[in-house]
Amino acid sequence: MLVIYPSAIEVDHDGDGISDRIENATGTDPLDDDTDNDGLLDGPGSGEDTNANGIVDLGETDGDGIQDGTESGLIVPEGLDTDMTVFVPDSDPDTTTNPTNPDTDGDGLLDGEEDLNGNGAVDPGESDPTAVTGYIRIEPSVVNLAGRGKWISCYIELPIEYDVSEIDIGSLMLQKSLNAEWQPSEIGDYDSNGIPDLMVKFNRQEVAVALEPEVQMVHLTGQLFDGTPLDGLDLIRVIY
């Protein structure tokens, strides 16, 4: 008959999936199921420490500046010991980023560089960490409501691995409310940096009316023909 002595039993007082012995040896708290207070349990149930060895292994977290629980879409913690003054609930749980990939959309910007306040939502002045972030330039950068011009131009340049000819013009919007015109549009190299850009037009009066009479960040959203979302930011000033 096999006898298991109590000393051989792995004890897990906080129920996070990592034994007290390993937590004591590696520095997490054996009496706290969420040592880093990000809303995810320390152990394998959440995927934070998938092999329950008490060590941050490759692929278990990304250090991108956003809490892993927020990236996972949590609005309440998984466990009972999370410090609620530290935990940041996801303000937009319908969209999530990858807690094991520091650049979810692969556009060269860390998720935390795009979601500046780390709350899981795309707030004013932020780009979307789930969308390819392009460089955009709006001309003129000062829009006079009393002016006679019909259009403002928006030049869109994507990271080198993407092709601006694949941008779906019909999907492009400023401030999620103003549609780009189908024509005129053209592909060129507005800033002469050797990277192609797409020029599209927006109705000047509609832009002026939609924006406040001050300097502000304008948000462009859209997608590629394959459904890949894209966005970009630029400063513009409206005067009357």
Image (tube, helix red, strand yellow):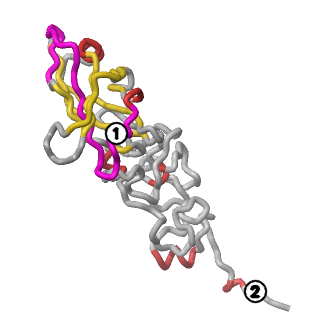
Local secondary structure at mark 2: loop
Q: Which residues are magenta?
A: 142-168
Closer to viewer: mark 1 or mark 2: 1
What amino acid does circle 2 point to?
A: Ile
Which x, y percent locates residue 211? 26, 18
Quarter-of-image position of residue 10:
bottom right
Please report contact status of discs 1 and 2: CB closer than 8 Å, yes or no: no
Which x, y percent locates residue 144? 15, 14
Q: 163 or 56, which is in the foreground?
A: 163
What amino acid does circle 1 point to?
A: Ser
Quarter of the picture holding the C terminus: top left
Decide: is 135 above or below 11. Answer: above
Determine which residue is flagged by label 1: 165
Quarter of the picture holding the N terminus: bottom right
Q: Answer few, some or many: residues within 10 Å of disc 1's Cα (few below 14, many 20 plus, some between 14 and 19).
A: some
Residue that sits furthest to the bottom in the current view: 1
Q: Earlier in the sequence, mark 1 or mark 2?
A: 2
Q: 158 or 41, which is in the foreground?
A: 158
- In the rendered image, residue 65 lying in the magenta stretch gets the answer no
Drawn side of residue 221 relative to residue 44, left or right: left
Q: Answer few, some or many: residues within 10 Å of disc 2's Cα (few below 14, many 20 plus, some between 14 and 19).
A: few
Residue that sits furthest to the right in the current view: 1
Q: Which residue is at a point 28% across and 35% down the rendered structure image? A: 125
Which x, y percent locates residue 14? 60, 64
Q: Is residue 204 visible?
A: yes
Decide: is 235 above or below 43. Answer: above
Q: Which residue is at a point 36% across and 50% down the rendered structure image? A: 111
Determine which residue is flagged by label 2: 4
Drawn side of residue 101 relative to residue 14, left or right: left
